[in-house]
Amino acid sequence: MIRVAVVTTELTASRVPQLDRLAQRPELELQVFYAAESIQGRTWSLQPRHPHEILRGPSLPLERLLFHDYPVTPGLWRKLSRGRFDVAVVWGWSVFAAQLAVVWARVHRVPYVVFSESQLVEPRSWAVHVLKRLVVPRVVRPAAGLLVTGTRAREHLVHYGGDPAAIRVFANTVDVASLERRVDAARERRAEIRARLGLADEDVAVLYAGRLVPVKAVEVLAASVARAGPPFRLVVAGDGPERERVERAAAPASIFTGFQGEAGLAETYAAADVFALLSRKETWGVVVVEAAAAGLPIVVSARVGAGADLVEDRVNGRVVPADDPAATADALRGLADGELRRIYGARSRERAAGWGYGPSEDAFVAAVTDALSRRQTSRGAGP
């Protein structure tokens, strides 16, 4: 078995199930270190089944610079040294724990694999751009392996000196097959679910699912749906600090369900006609995978990372500029035809088929196996 230390940022609803599954792989002995329970103010309660530890330390409020807090956790060095790990997998480079893990791996000659979600189209300050040019190549080039969420993250790593041949896809995803089954079962009660939500037969329900925070630009979606006019109606499955602002931008007939659990969200996907995510900054967007698995036409902003892999403009949805209600409203009006939505939705489901857990798990195992092999080859080569 390969002893693998995973150093990551925070508990998230999409990553915890993946790490649970990886911990069951016979090739791996996994230990996960989280920099904090949350670095972005997330409020969900998760119970990981994989071996893990949440690191402790003071947190610096660097959200304006990094878009998240910066927990300082020097105790990780001792924990990594005691673990006698064969390989380290490091999530990005923007938290102290990740930075320390890379230094530890270099000092102890332990191969490390870098996982990245970043993309080149993210809005960044000049200071961050300068910092990345100085730091990222020094992290990426010596890495024994590279994992990315998708096409945009691959382009980002190659831009900063990553070897294209060393890059594998470890998607930020869900159990696609399971979600498809749950949505299909709910669709048998679609009329009942829509009536419970307050949707009429003729309504075209445009769904947003997620937190109501500024970066998601849900108020832009609300204004876009209001501008598109009937028969479009906004359905928001989520809550957060931006709710009041979103409600002000939304048409009076918009529907707010609040946060939903797994079963409720599957029903809402079944009731929807279009899915939309117009984020100003979105390194990936697991809800895009969910919407594709649910068989929905998808409208995304050009800054949504998952759009590059799961949404093709005028094939299974629309790609629109960020912060552009007029363009988004026009895109929605183009989806007024029910037959076109059916065609787009079927194509979305076809695209989702390759984005389940299995391929990503295999990519993770292959990355750490190759990293360990490189280390052993290097040691056996002699002078």
Image: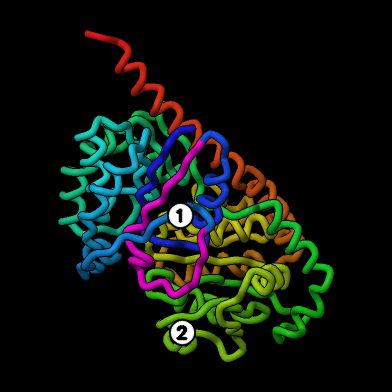
Give the left or right position of residue 79, taking residue 292 as reference: left
Give how far across and how far down residue 161 sits, in percent.
28, 33
Q: Extreme front residue here? A: 82
Q: Is residue 45 magenta?
A: yes
Mark 1 vs mark 2, CA separation in Å = 23 Å
Residue found 46% across the figure and 83% down from its top: 246
Choose the circle earlier in sequence order: 1 or 2: 2
Residue 82: name its quadrant. top left
- For the residue pair 20 and 291, the one nearer the viewer reads as 20
Among the 4 quarters of the image, the one containing residue 152: top left
Q: Which mark is residue 215?
A: none
Q: Amino acid at mark 1?
A: Trp
**Residue placed most toward the observer, 188 or 280:** 188
User: Relative to the observer, which residue lies in front, 280 or 20?
Assistant: 20
Query: On the rendered image, what quadrant is the C terminus found in?
Result: top left
- Disc 2 residue type? Arg
Task: Specify the principal SS of the magenta part.
Answer: loop
Instruction: Report which quarter residue 251 is drawn in.
Output: bottom right
Q: Which residues are magenta?
A: 28-48
Can residue 277 be seen? yes
Placement of 143 over or under 30, stated as above or below: above
Instruction: Find out whether residue 212 is within the magenta segment.
Output: no
Expressed as whole percent of the image width and height from the top left, the position of residue 310 reads 57, 50
Rendered position, 238 above or below 94: below
Residue underneath mark 1? 284
Report the disc number at residue 243: 2
Q: Residue at x 33, y 66 (%)?
A: 39
Label 2 residue SS:
helix
Q: Position of residue 382 (x, y in %)?
A: 26, 9
